[in-house]
Amino acid sequence: MFPGKINPRQMKKMMKQLGMEMEELPAREVVIKLEDREIVIENPTVNVIRAMGQKTYQITGEEREVLAIPEEDVKLVAEQAGVSTEEARKALEKTGGDLAEAIVLLTGGG
């Protein structure tokens, strides 16, 4: 995009001339919640860029995906299998959210 290397101070000056501001946020973790899963960005670098009355967030870091398991499912599996909610959650994560398979896994059935 830009020829050669531009040091951060020059970049900040150019952005200011264009009416843009950039600020780094001291974030520890960023979670993006989707319908069926969450994307967790660990050790992120989060920059907020303000331009033309809008804020844009730029996020970089180590990504991992987590299956979103509804709390009702965790409670149902825990109740049906007679285990703690923590054990039920682990079983649901292991089975990809399949309730019946998680119950069978926890009860030793099948």
Image: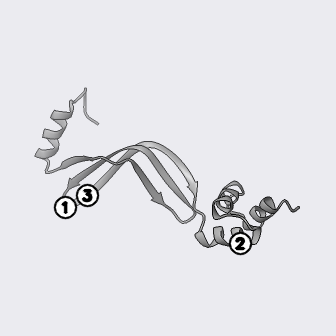
Q: State the image coordinates of residue 25 (x, y, percent, origin top left).
A: 28, 48
Q: Which kind of residue does numbered mark 3 sit on? A: Lys
Residue marked by disc 3: 55
Q: State the image coordinates of residue 71 (x, y, percent, origin top left).
A: 59, 69
Secondary-structure class at tag 3? strand
Picture quadrant of residue 110: bottom right
32 vs 25, left or right, is right
Label 2: how many Cα within 10 Å (few below 14, some 14–19, many 20+)? some
Q: State the image coordinates of residue 65 (x, y, percent, origin top left).
A: 55, 51
Q: Nearer the viewer, mark 2 or mark 3?
A: 2
Residue marked by disc 2: 79
Q: State the image coordinates of residue 99 (x, y, percent, origin top left).
A: 72, 67
CB-based contact (under 8 Å), mark 3 and mark 1: no
Q: Nearer the viewer, mark 2 or mark 1?
A: 2
Q: Work out whether mark 2 precedes mark 3 in sequence or the reverse, and give the earlier one.
A: 3
62 or 94: nearer the eye? 94
30 vs 46, left or right, is right
41 or 17: nearer the eye? 41
Picture quadrant of residue 12: top left
Report how far apart the C-alphas of labels 3 and 1 lie in the structure.
7 Å
CB-based contact (under 8 Å), mark 2 and mark 3: no
Residue marked by disc 1: 53
Q: Which kind of residue does numbered mark 2 sit on? A: Glu
Q: Which kind of residue does numbered mark 1 sit on? A: Gly
Looking at the image, which residue is at 21% across and 34% down?
Answer: 8
Secondary-structure class at tag 2? helix
Secondary-structure class at tag 1? loop
Label 3: how many Cα within 10 Å (few below 14, some 14–19, many 20+)? some
Looking at the image, which residue is at 53% across and 47% down?
Answer: 64
96 vs 19, left or right, is right
